[in-house]
Amino acid sequence: ILQDFVPASGLTLIQYVDDLLIAGQTEEQVRKESIKLLNFLGLKGLKVSKSKLQFTEEKVKYLGHYIEKGEKMIDPERVQGILSLPTPGSKKQVRQLL
């Protein structure tokens, strides 16, 4: 369906399965394009979850990463899960961990 949607010049639309991200230089450009995309999806009979919607935010969570001003950081919750694992004490435990 999204192959029929053409973002405005200077804006980028990224899709991974059902996760969408619009990026651009200015908040106004991104806001207008986001509204255009939401209307397009509505006309195609698709709905967007309000709880997952991050509308023209400077910092967004996308695919388990936080993206802000061109920088990408892994979600601290994901890192905490790894850090909370017990330290392996034997070769067998290292193999199990890997």
Image: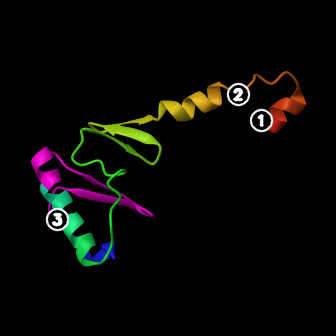
How far separated are the C-alphas under marks 2 and 3? 45 Å
Q: Are marks 1 and 2 in contact (CB under 8 Å)?
A: yes
Q: Residues within 10 Å of mark 2 (few under 14, many from 20)?
A: few
Q: Nearer the viewer, residue 42 or 78?
A: 42
Residue at image location 12% in from the left, 52% down from the top: 29
Q: Quadrant of the N terminus?
A: bottom left
Q: Is residue 9 magenta?
A: yes
Magenta part of the chain: 7-31
Callout 1 amino acid: Leu
Q: Secondary structure at mark 2?
A: loop
Circle 2 is placed at which residue position? Answer: 85
- Considering only order in the chain, which callout, 3 or 2, is on the residue closer to the N terminus? 3
Q: Which amino acid type corresponds to the residue marked 2 in the rendered image?
A: Leu
Instruction: Classify residue 21 by image quadrant.
Output: bottom left
Element carrying mark 1: helix
Residue 26: image x %, image y %? 13, 45
Q: Give the label on residue 36, or none.
A: 3
Q: Alpha carbon of mark 1 to alpha carbon of mark 3: how far?
A: 46 Å
